[in-house]
Image: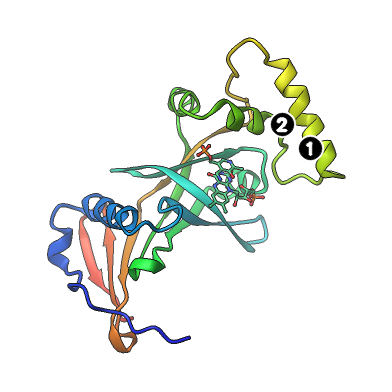
Amino acid sequence: MRVAYGGDADVTEADLADGWLALARSWLQQAIDAQLPEPNAIVLGTVDAEGRPATRTVLCKEMRDDGIVFYTNHTSEKGGHLAGRPVASATFPWIGIQRQVTVRGSVTRVSAEETAAYWATRPRGSQLGAWASEQSRPIASRADLERQLDEVTRRFEGGDVPVPPHWGGYLVAAETVEFWQGRNNRLHNRLRVTPRDGAVVRLQP
Ligand SMILES: Cc1cc2nc3c(=O)[nH]c(=O)nc-3n(C[C@H](O)[C@H](O)[C@H](O)COP(=O)(O)O)c2cc1C
Ligand SMILES: Cc1ncc(COP(=O)(O)O)c(CN)c1O
């Protein structure tokens, strides 16, 4: 497998004139228009107490001035990592449009109000799933997991499903944001922005 990159216009420092967020949103829109699967998926890297990295995919639910937001279980493995070392790296792997954006920075929880507002938009089935699963913990069988779902389904029958205390959003602060665009001969474009001072640095590919 050997794919030659290029064909579209070069991304340049001028594309960052309106800041990283405008460019990241425009690339996300291009990923959506190109019908990439799960265009808002990010590969999220965290580190454990010994500094060993771990990655998994989550969905970015908001891109805003101060960073990007995803939702998960606070008692999951990643939740444990973030409690101990509140830093992360998140990559949008838009390989189908020869792009990649990586946001790195400190991680904080979003407010309970913000989590509640997002929770309310989730389908009831996903809400029940968040109650039914002790994310990242072992379970003996699929049947046991389905029993846990039956149990919470009964518990919340006839009413709204509240936000689980173990569930919520995290903000990965945009301390650095790198825009990568594939080019021919592996001479890709890489622009790294530091939003705090607006500095843009071009990195060798
Ligand atoms: C496309 C895709 C999207 C996902 N989105 C989320 C998500 O938004 N939140 C989440 O908790 N897990 C999501 N997952 C599951 C995670 O990848 C992961 O398995 C789970 O969060 C447990 O991770 P952990 O054990 O490292 O904490 C997603 C998986 C895929 C493949
Ligand atoms: C375990 C888990 N939690 C949360 C999410 C995010 O889902 P939603 O879009 O329903 O918030 C996903 C998405 N695949 C998931 O797999």
Q: Measure the alpha-carbon separation of dots 2 and 1.
A: 7 Å
Identified at 71% across, 36% down, the residue is 133
Identified at 29% across, 85% down, the residue is 184
Q: Nearer the viewer, residue 199 or 162?
A: 162
- Determine which residue is flagged by label 1: 145
Residue 199, x across and y down, in percent: 21, 61
Considering the numbered disc 2 on the image, is that residue within a helix, a strand or a loop? helix
Depicted 166 relative to depicted 43: above or below: above
- Determine which residue is flagged by label 2: 132
Residue 164, x across and y down, in percent: 62, 25
Name the image quarter holding residue 125: top right
| Position of residue 99 in the picture relative to residue 107 (left or right) | left
Residue 22, x across and y down, in percent: 21, 50
Identified at 85% across, 44% down, the residue is 141
User: What quarter of the picture does the C terminus occupy?
Assistant: bottom left
Q: Are marks 2 and 1 in contact (CB under 8 Å)?
A: yes
Depicted 47 relative to depicted 183: above or below: above
Q: Nearer the viewer, residue 91 or 29?
A: 29
